[in-house]
């Protein structure tokens, strides 16, 4: 009996790269994908091959089992898994078989779309989906556009007469910008997101696409570099270690003299000292950890495996030539990159820089973030609480998050619901800060003025995000200065910071934002509205079998700040997985180090 496989259209944005053979589609994608990944996108790729191929190797178990007749074969390890499927060629009316391509929609359906933000397709130019055409004049082929009406942009090495957006084939950054902008636009149109709503990934991608890393840098004394971001690669001026040395306390021998069985001790070498006299055949030296090897010595026997009698020493265990020796440049060779640009400097990096003799480092000038809260009902802690008012908690949580991200805080305090005062404060902030951040005033209330004032002073993309908590989010520019208007609810403000402001700050610092994401088993039922990303506050722990398990902190209202204080992770419920059963796997984001 023939079983028919039904597939639905992909729920993720789909973008193709079409071109004549020889144009360099694969080479361009190989260079473009890292740029998209650096902007926080999770990329899937579907490539069309015009010939028979085999990714399996003859002689491997999987190859043997597939050749034995298995129609599908899955090979899995802790690092990756792969599925190989033999496609049956269709029969012609006379009973013969002829080769046929795999069904495009079935191939798309095989991707785990909950793990991806964008599917890139190489080839399949006869299928109908948005495509970017690549064109090189030297190939001597005509454009696929306008015959292919699905082409949305042209990437070429020369200009063409067309109304399509045109990009230089050698300007990868511009191509990446176009992809991110197209992605943001396509996800605005997603039916499941609702009118005017963006997915979390689309909003983040659009934000990052509109930001450029800061170019300002300064030379800073090493003792004051903790938490700063390295502005340029630190290249090692020396070998580390600078000379071959002993890895432990023991006896130094010549590798060409190991058969002697008994050696005369002719000296001792301590750390920080050097012995210039060579060690000859039949001789040995006592040597301490870190001490330079004297001429002739290239093997060290640990002290516990030796027997010293007077001036003679014997060895009580087998010896391997070159053992217990650290070679010059073994840790780091002269001229090698010791610390890459964009690295946030912590204790290990500062120690490494010091070991290279660096008294100072060139770091990116810390970003200055202007911060304020809005609302006539908001009061500073320490005052007597007036009727109907609340204490300002958001400014203090956000100040801590800003400092934890390696930035300086310009605290503008609490601004009342007054358009004139708000405009003056925003103008001042834009003149003195690298990024402006507010909490409150971005919803739809009668006194929520942020959107109006921001539109007057700059440009605004006011987004409602398909997530909970944190649906209202204002993002725009005050001139060239990025502005974020976060929700007023305390938990929503913190989660919006973690999801959007934190990656924006990392991008401005020239860093790649990639929070730790782990899989855990749910210990209770969890649910979300379909089509929406839900971030629950959770507590995870490891059971006796080493499996991570997670539960919520209890009530999940966006104003319950205690739920955030009790949490050690965020639980992400993706739109395609609205209901979580006990024992089902969910994604968690540990908060250790992010809420410092």
Image: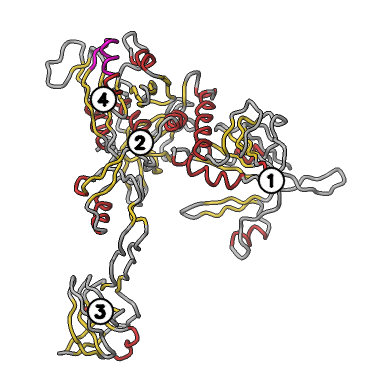
Q: Nearer the viewer, mark 4 or mark 2?
A: 2
In three-dimensional space, the C-alpha distance between marks 4 and 1, rounded to whole angstroms, equals 53 Å
- Mark 1 or mark 3, earlier in chain: 1
Residue at x 28%, y 70% (from the top left corner): 243
Circle 4 Cα neighbour tier, 10 Å, few/some/many (<14 / 14–19 / ≥20): many
- Does residue 443 appear in this view? no
- The one of 81 and 126 positioned closer to us in this rendering: 126
Left or right: where does residue 103 sit relative to residue 228?
Answer: right
- The one of 260 and 241 positioned closer to us in this rendering: 241
- Does residue 253 appear in this view? yes
In three-dimensional space, the C-alpha distance between marks 3 and 4, rounded to whole angstroms, equals 61 Å
- Label 1 belongs to which residue? 21
Q: What's drawn in magenta, residue-wise?
A: 415-426
- Label 3 belongs to which residue? 294
- Mark 4 or mark 1, earlier in chain: 1
Q: Position of residue 109 (x, y in %)?
A: 60, 38
- Label 4 belongs to which residue? 371
- Label 2 belongs to which residue? 214
Q: Nearer the viewer, mark 4 or mark 1?
A: 1
In three-dimensional space, the C-alpha distance between marks 3 and 2, rounded to whole angstroms, equals 50 Å
Q: Which corner quadrant of the image does residue 100 belong to?
A: top right
Circle 3 Cα neighbour tier, 10 Å, few/some/many (<14 / 14–19 / ≥20): many
Residue at x 33%, y 62% (from the top left corner): 332
- Asked if labels 3 and 1 touch by Cβ distance under 8 angstroms, the answer is no
């Amino acid at each position: 009996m023939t079983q028919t496989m039904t597939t639905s259209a992909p729920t993720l944005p789909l973008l193709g790269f079409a071109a004549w053979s020889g144009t360099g589609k694969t080479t361009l994608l190989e260079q473009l994908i890292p740029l998209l990944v650096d902007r926080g996108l999770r990329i899937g790729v579907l490539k069309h091959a015009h010939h028979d191929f085999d990714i399996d190797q003859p002689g491997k178990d999987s190859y043997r089992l597939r050749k034995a007749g298995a129609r599908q074969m899955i090979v899995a390890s802790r690092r990756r898994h792969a599925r190989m499927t033999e496609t049956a060629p269709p029969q012609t009316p006379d009973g013969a078989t002829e080769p046929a391509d795999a069904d495009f929609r079935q191939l798309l359906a095989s991707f785990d779309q909950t793990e991806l933000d964008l599917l890139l397709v190489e080839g399949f130019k006869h299928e109908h989906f948005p495509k970017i055409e690549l064109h090189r004049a030297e190939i001597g082929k005509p454009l696929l556009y306008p015959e292919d009406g699905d082409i949305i942009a042209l990437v070429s090495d020369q200009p063409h007469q067309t109304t399509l957006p045109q990009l230089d084939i050698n300007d990868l950054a511009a191509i990446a910008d176009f992809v991110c902008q197209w992605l943001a636009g396509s996800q605005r149109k997603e039916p499941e997101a609702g009118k005017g709503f963006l997915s979390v990934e689309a909003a983040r991608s659009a934000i990052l696409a509109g930001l450029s890393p800061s170019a300002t840098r300064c030379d800073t004394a090493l003792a004051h570099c903790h938490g700063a971001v390295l502005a340029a690669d630190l290249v090692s001026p020396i070998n580390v270690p600078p000379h071959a040395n002993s890895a432990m306390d023991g006896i130094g021998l010549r590798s060409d003299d190991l058969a002697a069985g008994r050696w005369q001790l002719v000296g001792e070498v301590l750390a920080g000292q050097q012995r210039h006299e060579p060690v000859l055949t039949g001789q040995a030296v006592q040597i301490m950890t870190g001490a330079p090897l004297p001429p002739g010595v290239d093997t060290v026997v640990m002290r516990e495996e030796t027997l010293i009698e007077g001036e003679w020493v014997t060895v009580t265990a087998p010896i391997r030539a070159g053992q217990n020796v650290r070679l010059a440049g073994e840790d780091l060779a002269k001229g090698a990159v010791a610390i890459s640009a964009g690295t946030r400097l912590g204790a290990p990096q500062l120690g490494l820089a010091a070991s290279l003799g660096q008294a100072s480092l060139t770091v990116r000038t810390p970003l200055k973030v202007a911060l304020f809260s809005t609302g006539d009902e908001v009061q500073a802690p320490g005052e007597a609480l007036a009727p109907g008012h609340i204490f300002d908690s958001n400014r203090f949580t956000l100040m801590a998050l800003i400092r934890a991200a390696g930035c300086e805080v310009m605290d503008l305090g609490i601004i009342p619901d007054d358009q004139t005062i708000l405009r003056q404060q925003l103008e001042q902030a834009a003149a003195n800060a690298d990024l402006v951040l507010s909490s409150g005033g971005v919803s739809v209330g009668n006194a929520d003025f942020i959107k109006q004032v921001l539109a007057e002073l700059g440009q605004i993309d006011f987004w409602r995000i398909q997530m909970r908590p944190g649906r209202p989010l204002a993002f725009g520019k005050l001139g060239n200065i990025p502005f974020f208007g976060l929700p007023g609810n305390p938990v929503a403000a913190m989660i919006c910071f973690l999801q959007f402001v934190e990656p924006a700050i990392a991008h401005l610092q020239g860093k790649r934002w990639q929070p730790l994401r782990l899989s855990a088993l749910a210990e209770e039922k969890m649910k979300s509205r379909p089509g929406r990303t839900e971030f629950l506050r959770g507590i995870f722990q490891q059971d006796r079998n080493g499996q991570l398990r997670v539960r919520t902190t209890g009530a999940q209202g966006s104003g319950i700040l205690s739920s955030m204080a009790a949490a050690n992770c965020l639980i992400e419920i993706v739109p395609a997985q609205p209901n979580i059963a006990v024992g089902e796997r969910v994604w968690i984001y540990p908060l250790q180090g992010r809420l410092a």
